[in-house]
């Protein structure tokens, strides 16, 4: 069945309640590559319970309705769906353990045309269950490659954040593990294409790919190290476009431009294939 724009726009996505522990916080950090040097005191703060801190990008796995677009009634061919864009805005630093509520709704649907697919924009607010205080705002877009031409609204895509036309000021390389996708999925995204070779091939990939949000987390680690001195409370906002998949085991290079105080541009490329995998990245941060 094709996408029914009105039905999808009014889809009631249940509030997702997440209770997470220090163990969950450490698992997330390990899944995006922290602890690769077990004697690095800076990384140890995210993977060891003594003085534990949460990575800002962990917000993407809290209170998130992972599988709602897999409901056949949405009209989305989810096997052909890719993560298009992701932004997080941090209002309060994440606690190393907590209880949060995620409230999600469809913000916009764009019909790019029968041969061009569709875009679904999803908005989520993460609040502390005890206090009701807003912790984080997340905006995602999903590119539904097989679902355009349903007669929905069309518009010109918003202009991406521009990357400076000069060499980056610095860069940071982090390898991923061959089992990175298998580890990252334990944070709650069990989409088969990240683990099952047959599912990956049916979606057009030679083998299982890394979750886009895992790549996002690797970039967040690189920015935290290179720009924010491993101080997660400094991170205010991080936004990016996904441009190409990463295969587990590849090394991700995050290229960083120091635009002005509190603002940096970035992009990520796979070193071995010289392929840009995240683009048009923006980081806003405090002192």
Image: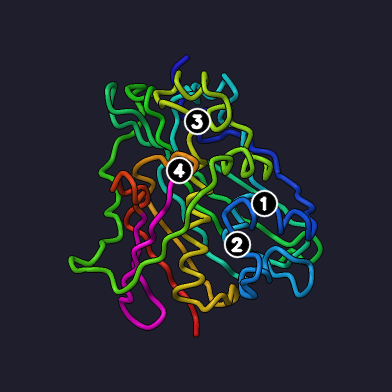
Magenta-drawn stretch contains 262: yes
Q: CA distance from mark 2 to mark 4?
A: 17 Å
**SS of the residue at dot 2?**
strand
**SS of the residue at dot 1?**
loop
Query: Could you tell me if the residues under marks 1 and 2 are in contact, i.e. CB atoms within 8 Å?
Result: yes
Q: Which residue is denoted by mark 1 in the rendering?
A: 62
* Residue drawn at the location 38% of the way across and 22% of the way down: 146
Discs 1/2, front: 1
Discs 4/1, front: 1
Number of marks in the rendered image: 4
- Vertical placement of residue 1 versus 56, above or below: above
Horizontal and vertical percent for residue 139? 49, 52
Q: CA distance from mark 1 to mark 2?
A: 10 Å
Query: Could you tell me if the residues under marks 3 and 4 are in contact, i.e. CB atoms within 8 Å?
Result: no
Which numbered disc, 4 or 1, marks the residue that appears first in the sequence? 1
Q: Residues within 10 Å of mark 2 (few under 14, many from 20)?
A: many
With 193 as the anchor, is 151 left or right in this view? Answer: left
Discs 3/4, front: 3
Q: Which residue is denoted by mark 3 in the rendering?
A: 208
Which numbered disc, 1 or 2, marks the residue that appears first in the sequence? 1
Query: Could you tell me if the residues under marks 4 and 1 are in contact, i.e. CB atoms within 8 Å?
Result: no
Discs 3/2, front: 3
Q: Quadrant of residue 95?
A: bottom right
Horizontal and vertical percent for residue 69? 56, 30
Query: Could you tell me if the residues under marks 1 and 3 are in contact, i.e. CB atoms within 8 Å?
Result: no
**SS of the residue at dot 4?**
strand
Q: Which residue is denoted by mark 4 in the rendering?
A: 121
Which numbered disc, 2 or 4, marks the residue that appears first in the sequence? 4
* Residue drawn at the location 57% of the way across and 44% of the way down: 180
Discs 1/3, front: 3
Which numbered disc, 3 or 4, marks the residue that appears first in the sequence? 4
């Amino acid at each position: 069945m094709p996408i029914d724009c009105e039905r999808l726009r009014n889809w009631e996505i249940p509030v997702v309640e997440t209770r997470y522990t220090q163990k969950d916080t450490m698992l997330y950090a390990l899944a995006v590559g922290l602890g690769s040097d077990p004697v690095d005191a800076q990384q140890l703060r995210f993977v060891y319970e003594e003085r534990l801190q949460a990575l800002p990008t962990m917000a993407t796995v809290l209170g998130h309705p992972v599988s709602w677009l897999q409901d056949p009634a949405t009209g989305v061919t989810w096997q052909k769906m890719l993560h298009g864009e992701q932004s997080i805005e941090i209002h309060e630093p994440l606690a190393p353990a907590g209880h949060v509520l995620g409230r999600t709704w469809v913000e916009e649907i764009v019909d790019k045309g029968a041969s061009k697919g569709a875009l679904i924009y999803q908005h989520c607010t993460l609040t502390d269950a005890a206090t009701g205080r807003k912790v984080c705002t997340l905006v995602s877009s999903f590119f539904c490659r097989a679902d355009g031409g349903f007669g929905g609204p069309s518009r010109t895509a918003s202009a991406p954040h521009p990357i400076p036309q000069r060499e980056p000021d610095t860069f940071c390389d982090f390898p991923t593990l061959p089992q990175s996708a298998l580890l990252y999925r334990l944070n709650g995204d069990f989409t088969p294409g990240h683990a099952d070779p047959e599912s990956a091939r049916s979606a057009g990939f030679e083998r299982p790919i890394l979750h886009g949000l895992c790549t996002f987390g690797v970039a967040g680690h690189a920015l935290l190290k290179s720009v924010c001195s491993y101080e997660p409370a400094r991170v205010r906002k991080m936004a990016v476009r996904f441009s190409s998949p990463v295969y587990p085991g590849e090394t991700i290079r995050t290229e960083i431009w120091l635009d002005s105080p509190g603002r940096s541009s970035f992009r990520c490329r796979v070193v071995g294939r010289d392929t840009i995998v995240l683009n048009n990245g923006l980081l806003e941060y405090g002192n």
